């Protein structure tokens, strides 16, 4: 699964999402996803991550060995992305 495919899957599930995917190892199976969406407003970190995993679920643990998540609202996306 490519970074573009991961991003597309997340955006299909969370249409307002801003997404950036980084390949952590260069091997195409360990990624970090930064996801900003207003759907996360008022939700716990676990609930936010569940929404993202619902979008990419079956691929994680298979094609995608590891997916690290950083989630936030759209208002905080640029700040979270800058911190990495």
Image: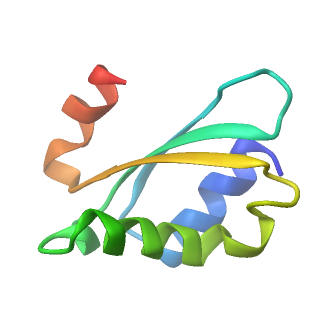
- Residue 4 placement, left or right of 76: right
Q: Nearer the viewer, residue 51 or 14?
A: 51
Q: Who's the residue at 33% across and 30% down the image?
A: 81
Q: Is residue 10 visible?
A: yes
Q: Looking at the rendering, which quadrant does residue 45 occupy? A: bottom left
**Residue beneath the point at 12% across and 74% down:** 42
Count of marks placed on residues: 0
Residue 77 percent location from the top left of the image: 25, 42
Q: Is residue 81 left or right of residue 12?
A: left
Is residue 14 visible to us here?
A: no
Q: Residue at x 74, y 55 (%)?
A: 5
Q: What is the image's colouring?
A: rainbow
Q: Nearer the viewer, residue 67 or 23?
A: 67
Q: Position of residue 41 (x, y in %)?
A: 15, 70
Percent coordinates x, y for residue 50 in the rendering: 45, 74
**Residue at the image position 87 percent from the left and 60 percent from the top:** 62
- In the picture provided, is 83 more to the left or to the right than 31? left
Measured as percent of width and height from the top left, residue 56 is found at 66, 68
Where does the C terminus fall, quadrant-wise?
top left
- Whether residue 6 sits left or right of residue 27 in the image: it is left
From what the image shows, is residue 66 above or below residue 37? Answer: above
């Amino acid at each position: 699964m490519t970074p573009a495919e991961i991003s597309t899957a997340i955006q299909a599930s969370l249409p307002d999402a801003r997404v950036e995917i980084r390949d952590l190892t260069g091997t195409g199976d360990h990624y970090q996803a930064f996801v900003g969406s207003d759907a996360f407003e008022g939700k716990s970190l676990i609930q936010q991550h569940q929404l993202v995993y619902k979008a990419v679920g079956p691929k994680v643990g298979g094609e995608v060995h590891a997916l690290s998540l950083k989630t936030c609202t759209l208002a905080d996306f640029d700040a979270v992305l800058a911190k990495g």
